[in-house]
Amino acid sequence: MIEPTRPLLPVVGEPPRERSDAARNRVALLEAAMALVERCGVDALTMDNVATGAGVGKGTVFRRFRSREGLMAALLDHSESAWQAEVMAGPPPLGPGAPAMERLLAFGDSRIEINLRHADLIRAAGAAATHNYAAYSFAATHTRHLLGELGVRGDIALLATALLAPIEAVILQQQVEIERMDLARIRAGWRDLVRRVVGEP
C-alpha cells in the first residue's frame, strides 16, 4: 500500500505539504493507478480509467496531476521514495546492518528489479519524470558510500557511475526485450563487474 508520506526524493517543483484529506485523496488515486498498471500495463493508464478506479470524477484526477504524464511521474516518485526508504532503513542486506559487499550486491539486484518493473512508466512519463535526476543522485551517493566502505581505490565517483550504467532502465530494456538476455545472466554479469571493481577474486 502507498503511504501518504512526504516523498524522500528532492522532486523538482515539489508542492507545499498537503492537508491530510488531500494526501489521502492523492494516495487513493495513486493506488488506483498502480493497480491499473500492474493489471493491464502502462497503455491502460488513462485519466478516465484512474478516475473510475478511484471512484472520483475525471476533473479530480486532472486537478491533481494535470496530465497523464504527470500522473506517471507521481507514480514513479512514490515507488522511488518507498525503495529509498528500504535502502536507508529497511532490513538487511538492502538496508543497514549487513557487510558493505552484501549491501552492494543486494542494491544491484533490487535496482535491476525496480528499473525493469518501471521501465515503461519511465519512458511514457517523458519530460515529466524529473525524479530521474534525484533517483540517480541517490543511487550514486549510496554506491559511492559502499565503495568507500569497501576500501576501493581510484575515482570513486566514476567507478560508481560505471557500476550504475548497466542497470539503468534503458540498458536493461535493451538487453531483456531486444537482445533477449536472461535476467539471471544480467544479475551475474553485474555481480562480476562489482567484484572486479572492488578487487575481489
Image: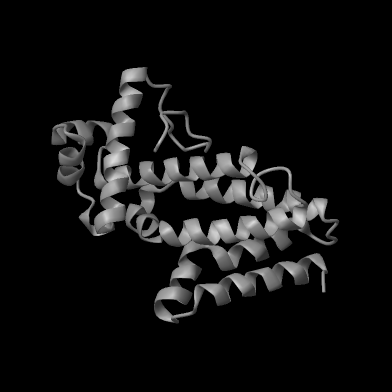
- Please tell me whether residue 76 is drawn above or below residue 174 in the rendered image: above
- Please tell me whether residue 1 is drawn above or below residue 24 in the rendered image: below
Q: In the displayed structure, does residue 154 sit left or right of residue 33?
A: right
Position in image of residue 100 (x %, y %): 76, 53
Which residue does the image show at 82% across and 69% down from the upper left?
Answer: 200
Which residue does the image show at 45% across and 28% down from the upper left?
Answer: 5
Mark count: 0
Q: In the displayed structure, does residue 39 sit left or right of residue 115?
A: left
Which residue does the image show at 71% across and 67% down from the upper left?
Answer: 194
Position in image of residue 149 (x %, y %): 81, 51
Q: Quadrant of residue 189?
A: bottom right
Q: How is the image coloured?
A: one colour
User: Looking at the rendering, in which quadrant would you find the C terminus?
Assistant: bottom right
Position in image of residue 143 (x %, y %): 69, 53
User: Looking at the rendering, in which quadrant would you find the N terminus?
Assistant: top left
Q: Residue furthest bottom?
A: 179
Front residue of 47 and 106: 106
Q: Quadrant of residue 158?
A: bottom right
Position in image of residue 174 (x %, y %): 45, 74
Viewer can see residue 69: no
Viewer can see residue 178: yes
Which residue does the image show at 70% across and 73% down from the upper left?
Answer: 192
